[in-house]
Image: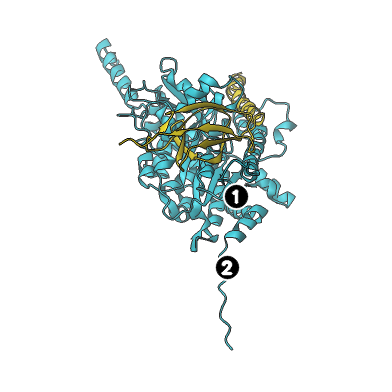
Chain colours: A cyan, B yellow
Amino acid sequence: MRSCPRPTKAVAAVLAAIALGVLAGCAAPMNPRLDHFDPRAGYRFANLDAPDNSDDLFVILTFSGGGTRAAALAYGVMQKLADTPIQIFGQQRRLLDEVDVISAVSGGSFTAAYFGLFGDELFTRFQKDFLRANVQDGLVLNAMAPWGALRLLGPYYSRSDLAGDYYDRSIFRGRTFADLAARKRRPYIIINSTDMTIGAPFHFTQDQFDLLYSDLGPMSVGRAVAASSAVPVLLAPMTMRNYPAGDDFREPTWITRALDSDRPGSNARYRKAEQWQSYRDKERRPYIHLMDGALSDNLGVRPVLHALTTDSSWSLQSMVNLDRVRCIVVIVVNAGTQGLSELDRSRATPDVVNVARATGGALLTNTVLDSITLLRERIGSLQQAAHAPMPTSAPDSTVSGRNFLVIEVGFDGVRDPKRRADFWSIPTSFKLKDAQVDELIAVGGELLNADEGFQALVEALTPPPTTQPQGN
Amino acid sequence: MWRRILTAALLAAAIPTAGGCARDARRVLNEAPEQYVIVHYPDSRSVYVDGREHALTNRVILISPGHYEFSLGSPDDYRPKTVVADVRGTSRTAPKEIVFEKLPASN
């Protein structure tokens, strides 16, 4: 019997070179460098028109994490807004048309991004494309397929990159942030992830990418959603390049001013400035690793909190001062769950999957409560300031007769304890039963409709019934 | 064993992040979020704060506590060109007052 000839060293070297070449070619696409810095270009709030949308009523939605459970609950709320007719300045519209900003995290970012890209197609295609699709198995099959498995062998292609590519193909049709910007219309979609080194929220907006001297436009939306939902352990962090800034780069003035003049550690402004300025350290931070947005903000409310300050690029405070808004409504859609876990019945150490679930669930409950409390306080404070008495020296008031409202849609609001427990028991997963999806969509609309603040809002905006002239 | 290592790594990564969020929340809660400013100028004009349009002149306006650079919108007929002020400890009835003077029209 003849033995197979051993490959020579030269052949082995060639094979190794080919393998390396293949793996290098498998690297995930990096966010590109900016050609030049233009603080007015790209995907920013200021670049989105609102032709059918009145600034008088400014509506912000925030969607929490929670896999398909969160996406379906958010979808139910969107459907209810689409089914709610209102009248502003004599024109009839849907309340959905008045939505100006959607800030979303993890599972909720699927619904937000889909609506941002495809508008009302949300109501005709999203259920099939995502809510009722078995995304979880799709991800596993892609990872096990020869090409997927080979790419995952390389150091520059992670499970989150694979997820992003899969979402691009199967859900977001390869659309990019340039496509989102090209729509030139609100709502402004903010997809949130977490910068794992500094523990701060990282937003997929050009304002944030300016700090990396990077162009968000060519980035695919699917990759942003994958970064936003990169659950620790189950999915790997997604990596962004932090490029050396060009000579034309101008850091937002407030960052420098806060660091130069405010007191360290004394306020959130200083801390945010510190976090944002960390991207200037290109030697120590040439790469930024992003994880699930839920880790730093499970409700997606932190961009809204920032917008309540002077420094935001879409400052609500400025809009109030400039008399551009009269009513601000923040609808927080919270798909968080509660309740005791079966894990506590066993002495055995919880496995990785259960630890990952706990990290995205119970362990974040307190921070969720902090965020909601803070948002209500800040909105209340703005409302109070708006109605405070005028000093005699001021000839005019900018802030009077305004209404600011926070509405929370969450399973806490389900009155029937058994039904509530059923919702709390729905796992954080990308594969739910059709009946669960149906229930989640239905309860999203029900909970919004049952909220007293929402009822008062709708009543105030409902067109008056046309009175028929009575014949004699 | 590998599960414990992964668990420890996960918690080390996730818990400080969540804790940082809560600490931020407490910091913000300790500070009066709305401060008040009135920018005096003979005409009604846009007020720019750190380069962004934020309000109008001669009205009591809202601002977050901190240091800011104030300027006015065009035309460039006022002085000083900018005013840097620390805005804290104000109230609606006692706002921080910032004054810009109108330059005489040049021929």
Distance Cα–Cα, label 1 vs label 2? 21 Å
Say if residue A77 shows up in the picture. Answer: yes
Q: Residues within 10 Å of mark 2 (few under 14, many from 20)?
A: few
Quadrant of the frame with the C terminus of chain A = bottom right
Quadrant of the frame with the N terminus of chain A = top left
Q: Nearer the viewer, residue A394 or A153?
A: A394
Name which residue lies at 41% across and 50% down. Answer: A118
Residue bearing the label numbered 1? A402
The percent position of residue B53, horizontal first and vertical second, equals 45, 38
Say if residue A144 shows up in the picture. Answer: no
In the rendered view, would you say A150 is above or below B93?
above
Left or right: A248, with A81 as reference point: left
The percent position of residue A125, horizontal first and vertical second, equals 44, 53
Residue bearing the label numbered 2? A464
In the rendered view, would you say A144 is above or below A14?
below
Type of amino acid at the residue the image marks with label 1: Arg
- Quarter where residue A17 is shown: top left
Left or right: A9, with B53 as reference point: left
In the rendered view, would you say A168 is above or below A50?
above
Query: Chain letter of disc 1?
Result: A
Query: Chain letter of disc 2?
Result: A
| Secondary element type, mark 1 | loop
